[in-house]
Image: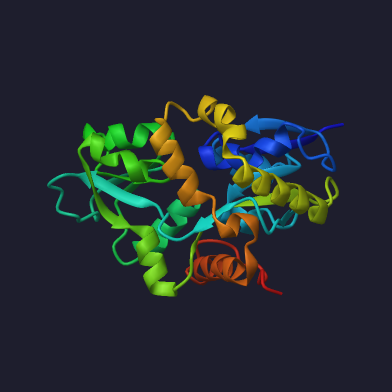
Amino acid sequence: MALSLAVSPCPNDTFVFHALVHGLIPAAETVDLTFADVDVTNTAAERGEFDLVKVSYAALPWLLGDYELLPCGGALGRGCGPLVLTREGHDGDLSGATVAVPGDRTTAYLLFRLWSQDNPPARIEVVPFHQIMPGVADGTFDAGLVIHEARFTYPRFGLTALADLGEWWESDTGLPIPLGAILARKGAVDPQEAAEWIRTSVSMAWADPDASREFVLANAQEMEPDVVKQHIELYVNEFTLDLGKEGLAAADALLGRAAAAGLTPPVPSLLT
């Protein structure tokens, strides 16, 4: 029986998992792939719906009882954090604002809550990611929290970046930004074996980028090839191959600060 895998259709995930999902790794088990946005997988994983699943680091406090964090395959890095966008001319005061966010357990929203603790917005609305920038542009929302390819495309909507939460996080902690994690469901898959399959898949993607090109572009949600290339270069990095101590320290810092602020349940250190 195939293992169930859920990742996003974003270029970094399709690039990383191409070899694994296409049966190109001889030692790996067959994988049954589901594409879903991370706000969907965060809650689906809480129900135990997938054997291997991409989730937000912010969702880990609700998932680590049933899942184990894998040390590879996710999205963690520098210069790749979420942006808070507003229309040009906005005064930057969010105290009375309605802010659109892509999910209430996303790392982006958790970073936003930590950043805005002293001046939280009046209202938060969770909306599908593709509606955020158009909604800010047309005045439906006063501001929007965006991730991924929006870093490259938001000027097209006439928007301006009020804050780069990645820059804020890095300047405050000195650590990379922990965005998306890969989890293995306990009892369903051996985490060490799964990590080796994923690392092999990453290495194969780097060794022959053209092999995954058709698969990546077919699922890139109408992104132009140059944006796809920028996306992969930004989000697929050394931490994708191995979180290492620095990556785990970043996740620890995020979850520790969130728990201290009363935003998430506490979790044991990931470094032990």
Residue 168 vertical position relative to residue 183 in the rendered view, above or below: below
Q: In the rendering, at what x and y percent does residue 31 appear?
A: 77, 34
Task: Report whether residue 246 is seen.
Answer: yes
Q: Residue at x 32, y 38 (%)?
A: 153
Q: Residue 22: name its quadrant.
A: top right
User: Where, quadrant-wise, is the C terminus in this rendering?
Assistant: bottom right
Q: Is residue 154 left or right of residue 254?
A: left
Q: Residue at x 29, y 62 (%)?
A: 119
Q: Residue at x 67, y 70 (%)?
A: 268
Q: Residue at x 59, y 53 (%)?
A: 59
User: Where, quadrant-wise, is the N terminus in this rendering?
Assistant: top right
Q: Residue 6: name its quadrant.
A: top right
Query: Depth check: 200 or 161 in front?
Result: 200
Q: In the rendering, at what x and y percent does residue 12 appear?
A: 54, 42
Q: Is residue 16 left or right of residue 234?
A: right
Q: In the rendering, at what x and y percent does residue 188 appear?
A: 84, 45
Q: In the rendering, at what x and y percent does residue 95 appear?
A: 24, 56
Residue 244 vertical position relative to residue 188 in the rendered view, above or below: below
Query: Depth check: 122 or 102 in front?
Result: 102
Task: Report whether residue 102 is seen.
Answer: no
Query: Depth check: 83 or 241 in front?
Result: 241
